[in-house]
Amino acid sequence: MGFARLREDAPQYRIYKAKRKRTQQLRLLATLPAVGSDRAYRLLDYFGSIQACITATADELEKVPGIRPKTAAAVRDLVSPQASRPLTGN
């Protein structure tokens, strides 16, 4: 009887896990400059993943409703390869 209960709960757990992952993705995107929860939701809906959002060009970001050129540029500046270089002590 215990295994039957686990099997019944498995689909609910998968749904919960998927929602939890999406919530984490939204929170991460919301920390980007000039991107609040509403824009984070739009970005994730439009691109489908954080990887796609981060690798998108400024022009692609501007195609998302509510993302203006200034916001797109701020996001690109933050996630560009040059921005990820290590800080020096100088």
Image: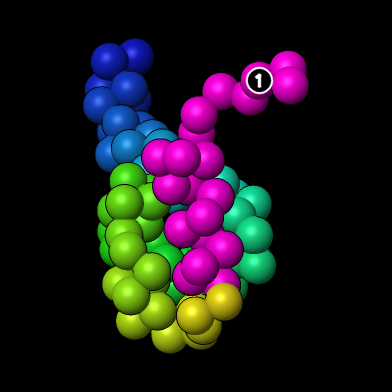
Q: Amino acid at mark 1?
A: Thr
In front: 81, or 36?
Answer: 81
On the image, the x and y values in percent for residue 71 come to 56, 72
* Quarter of the N terminus within the rendering: top left
Residue at which label 1 appears: 88
Q: What is the image's colouring?
A: rainbow
The stretch of residues the image draws in magenta is 71-90
Q: Position of residue 35 (x, y in %)?
A: 61, 66
Our reading of the magenta stretch's main secondary structure is helix
Residue at horizontal 50 percent and vertical 68 percent from the top: 73
32 relative to 58 in the view: left or right: right
Q: Quadrant of residue 16?
A: top left
Give x and y (percent) for residue 50.
Answer: 38, 49
Q: Nearer the viewer, residue 21 or 34?
A: 34
Would you say 15 lies left or right of 19 here? left
* Residue drawn at (50%, 34%) of the image: 84
Residue 89: tell me if it is visible: yes
Residue 12 vs 71, above or below: the answer is above
Mark 1 crowd level (few <14, some 14–19, many ≥20, 10 Å Cα): few
Residue 11 quadrant: top left
> Is residue 32 highlighted in magenta?
no
Residue 37 can be seen, yes or no: no
Please state the horizontal and vertical placement of residue 36, each as a whole percent of the image.
Answer: 65, 66
- Would residue 35 be found to the left or right of residue 2 on screen? right
Residue sitting at 30 percent across and 31 percent down?
Answer: 10
Most distant residue in the right direction: 90
State whether residue 2 is above or below residue 37: above
